[in-house]
Image: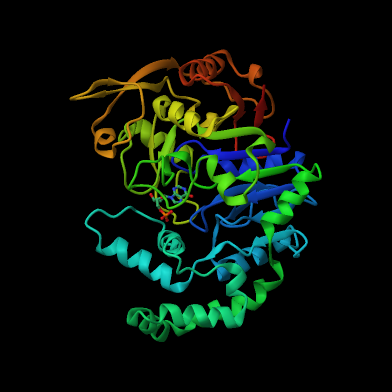
Amino acid sequence: MGNVSILVGAQWGDEGKGKWIDILARDTDIVARFQGGNNAGHTLYVNGQKVVLHQIPSGIFQPGKISALCAGVVVNPSQLIMEIKKVADHVVLTPERLWLSARAHVITPWHIHLDSKRESEAANPIGTTKRGIGPTYAEKANRTGIRLGDYVNEGKRKEWYELLSQNPAFVEHRKTHAADWREFEESAAQLKAFVVDAEHLVRKEIKAGKRALLEGAQGALLDINHGTYPYVTSSETAAGGAFASLGFSPRNVDKIYGVAKAYVTRVGSGAFPTELNDSVGQHLATLGKEFGATTGRPRRCGWLDAVALRYSGAISGYDGLILNKMDILTGLDEIKVCVAYDHPVHGRIEEFPWDHDILQECKPIYKSFKGWTETLPAGGKISDLPAAARAYVDGVEEIIGYPVSMVGTGVNRQDALFR
Ligand code: IMP
């Protein structure tokens, strides 16, 4: 049995991963983020206080744990410094507790500019968070990016400026956005002490028998390879991304968890077969407080999509699904789960299509469940759920074909049910 667990979003992000990382971090020694950047917004309630993390792993509030950002992450330096200051009320992050990978690529003011420009000029915008994520990963793939280890080295930073200065638009941007670039420069010195060979250190700890929890951001359906391309993010959000980012043997893995809401939300553009533009969608949005933690944008809401969850399970190999925010369904007379799609040309579709155009044309085929009115238990076992809620969980398990191992019934740490 291995000593590494992986937790990823099973839908289009915003499944509530932060809360579950916080819970699972109790039994782990290291929590490491493996992809994405400050496009993520992980909301946690610590001692009743709401905290939104964008870059620091969500295990940070469990005493004594080490947090790491691995090679596959992209880092916004000034935002990270702000975040370190923001959590200082709860935890003081020293270089012993926060390891930043020297290999992680840096988001610069230039990349943020390119992201916004592309979105505003595109005929079909992706609906990105405009945090510079895509351009930073593109630069990485183009071998013209800047890694944290080089960024905190003044000489290497200058070399990078020279490389990009072959582009007059970059030179112009540095002139016209001098304050942003000054902040970018100053942040390097502040982060320097945290920048290490994080992958080596994490692997060493794993070898020594310490437990590691690898935290994904966004969700499997936003994966650059397996998601609803082109309406995806720019990194590998499925569990496989953890191996690429940290660089370790898959044989070390003990458990892989996917987190899904008991319904679905999506921010930004892209197909969403179970989307509800009616009073039920409104109910989910209002009760679920479905506004983006990073951008504040309203999230699109819909019924649980089991076709998507079967696919998500297949590409990440979940040992168990964490079915979150089940309390938001309380009070609905009828609850639906999409079991297959109906397509005007291809008829009944059971497999999540690779082609976004086809997905766009799919209509959901639903199975209906009886609702419940009882308040769901805060803490305890899944078997403590009221009968109708239990039947819903059992039904979901049967349709997706893998176990529901935990259920979320509220925003706090304790609102968690286990098998
Ligand atoms: P980007 O990651 O900012 O490039 O945005 C690409 C797509 O991923 C857009 O549809 C975003 O709304 C979505 N996205 C990025 N980060 C998150 C997240 O943390 N939660 C939900 N959607 C996200």
Identify the residue at the far left of this view: 345
In the rendered view, does 269 fall on the left or right side of 151? left
Q: In the figure, 195 relative to 30: above or below? A: below
Question: Which color scheme is applied?
Answer: rainbow
Whether residue 180 appears in this view of the structure is: no
State the image coordinates of residue 55 (x, y, percent, origin top left). Answer: 58, 57
Identify the residue at the far bottom of this view: 175
State the image coordinates of residue 144 (x, y, percent, origin top left). Answer: 45, 69
Please tell me which residue is depicted at 28% across the width and 63% down the height of the picture.
120
Q: Nearer the viewer, residue 64 or 290?
A: 64
The number of numbered badges drawn on the structure is 0
In which quadrant will I find the N terminus?
top right
Q: In the figure, 276 relative to 341: above or below? A: below
Please tell me which residue is depicted at 51% across the width and 39% down the height of the picture.
15
Residue 408 sits in quarter? top right
In the rendered view, does 62 fall on the left or right side of 119? right
Q: Nearer the viewer, residue 230 or 88?
A: 230
State the image coordinates of residue 215 (x, y, percent, origin top left). Answer: 61, 45
Please tell me which residue is depicted at 44% across the width and 79% down the height of the picture.
163
State the image coordinates of residue 334 (x, y, percent, origin top left). Answer: 41, 19
In the rendered view, does 311 fall on the left or right side of 211? left
Q: Nearer the viewer, residue 92 or 215?
A: 215
Whether residue 59 appears in this view of the structure is: yes
In which quadrant will I find the C terminus?
top right
In the rendered view, does 248 fall on the left or right side of 331? right
Q: In the figure, 331 relative to 144: above or below? A: above
Residue 117 sits in quarter? bottom left
